Amino acid sequence: MPLHDTSYQHWDGVHLGLWRRRWVIARNGLAAALQNKWMRNLVVLCWFGGLAMIAMLFVVGQLLVADSVIVQWVGNLNPQLQVFARMFTTWLEQHPEISVRTTQDVLFCFFGIFLMPVSIFALGMAMPVFITRDLGSNAIIIYSSKAVSRGDYLMGKFAAAFGVLVLTWLGPVCTAWLVGNLLAPDWSFFWHARVPLCHTLIFGLSSMCILSVLALGVSAVSPKEKTTIGLWYTAWILGGVVVPIATQTQPWLRHLSFNFNIDQIALGVFQLGDDLKIAQDNLPIFGSMLSNIRPDTMAALTAPATGGSVVALLLMAALAALVVRKRVKPE
Amino acid sequence: MPSPWVVPNLRLNMPTAPVIETQALTKVFGPQRALDGVNLTVAPGAIGLLGPNGAGKSTFMKCLLQLQPITSGSAKLLGREVGREGREIRKRVGYTPEQDCHIPGMAGCEYVTYCAQLCGLPFQAARQRAHEMLDFVGMGQERYRKADTYSTGMRQRLKLAQAIVHDPEIVFLDEPTNGLDPKGQAQILELVQSLWKTYGITVVVSSHLLQDVDKICEQIIIIARGRVLVHDTLENLKARKRGAAEVVMSARHLDLQAACARRSWPCEVLPNGHLKIEHQAESLNPLLTVLHELKLVPLEIIPSPNALEETFVQALEISHAAA
């Protein structure tokens, strides 16, 4: 016999609002994704990347401090690097508004692009917890019978995918920006670094929205976990294989790769070509270093195919939305 | 000691307004009419939705819950228009689907807590309610195990717990005893019965098993081929009997037939050898008197089926004829 009252009790409390219910779905999705040990390891790896970024920003900042360890360390480098470091320091001192912006733009762009594959990989691992499992277990009908609509459900799942990307991508980048500038020798670094932050947010948020929608679309393709995970990675890898081939034959085919499209958006948002040109003008030695870069790479950096990439990503997102609309039904 | 937001036991005001109102409710799947102009006004209570497989019971429930869009007609649930106030309706409604519907990887108590949160309960309240409901449905420590490992009986209990965790005013149970052994069936039916009788929650039980709804329901709706054949109280349906009985005799059939003819009672010999006698009385007394007068000892007397059984059989026949 139970020691406590096991009879039915009526509940007379206040119901929480709709956004809280959507948040519950998102939080549950994110928690389910993080139950995977490899996913947690991946998140930690991304935050180590963030730490590396902070270290780089710290080094750049310390170049302005005359008696810092970094400056002394630079003094022991080979002559060419010493010249570069001194010119860089002079540039930072004379034009901080341009130099800080340019330096951080370049760093955040490369960092963002570096973290993107890790984030895409993480999304693949989390694929089943978005929609696949709910399709496989008929749980959609449970959501539909509660006080949430299909739109609320999808918003929650979108937020879960977005949350994975925040943990593996935007979180480390934004934290690196904040901590890196806190460690800078001057508060004005925050002001000078506002444009790189805006670029990071524009690129990060737009790419994450697109990737989240794509992830939901792939996740809704099948109720089988292996199928959706396989489909996501296959699409990613095939895209990577197609790009170098298409560059030589049919350049428009490169837009079949969502990875390529996002890279192009990064280059378009950060305007890396302009930043490199500024750096080249101000650091002559940098110019000679850039001359080693292949012309086609330089052309890709200065004139990214942003328009085509945006259109291609929007088409992919529309296709994903169509799949979700067709598949996510109570029955 | 209960929290201040918990109102123990009975609802003080038992609901009286109709809980379900439909007008010409129709649902079409391609060439098939799953619901064909259903008109109903259903008062609160324990309601049995009876019919053979494929009769339209589940579709009827799903249309009311907006899990299926209505093709034509209109429906109101708890006084609110279905299709316009979906979230508000579902906040006050519980539902257990026929098939399994747990979320993989979640323990039973996590799942019920999550369902409560989806209905708008704050986390603390949701967790407390989840445990209370799991106690109520009779789940012990297995609530901490992943639902993927549950037996059919446990899953049915879990489904019931998630359906009532937010304290709904009406609960729809789609084939709640499917896959259960007789003991499990009896336990689930007892729980379901208590929801209305003790706690004032209207229960709509869909089943193709007559004995299930016969045990726990006060109102019966029999559906066949998407049409409502009957909607009445169980009491009325049982009281409505045709004055007929089947008599199983070992000998002297002709004596009994002659006695019936003298009283102008139609009598026929069925293919199984039983005598079907329409004695036209509510009780068996006149027939027993005749048997007594003739000093006949029948092997068995089978009273005529009541209207509930007859209509159910009729529904089955309609369904079979259509198949």
Image (cartoon, rainbow, N blue to C red):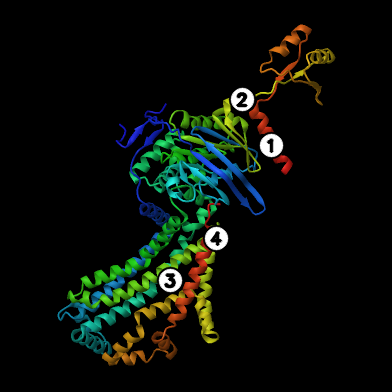
Percent position of residue A210, x then y? 44, 69
Q: Is residue B125 left or right of residue A36?
A: left
Q: Amino acid at mark 4?
A: Lys
Residues at marks 1 and 4, CA–CA distance in whole angstroms: 35 Å
Residue behind mark 3: A117
Residue behind mark 4: A326
**Which numbered tag is attached to residue B316?**
1
Discs 4, 2: same chain = no
- State yes or no: discs 2 and 1 in contact (Cβ < 8 Å): no
Q: Amino acid at mark 2?
A: Lys
Does dot 1 land on a helix, a strand or a loop? helix
| Chain of the residue where label 4 is placed in the rendered structure | A
Write down the quadrant of residue B280 in the picture.
top right
**Which numbered tag is attached to residue A260?**
none
Does dot 2 land on a helix, a strand or a loop? helix
Label 2, residues with CA under 10 Å away: few <14, some 14-19, many ≥20: some
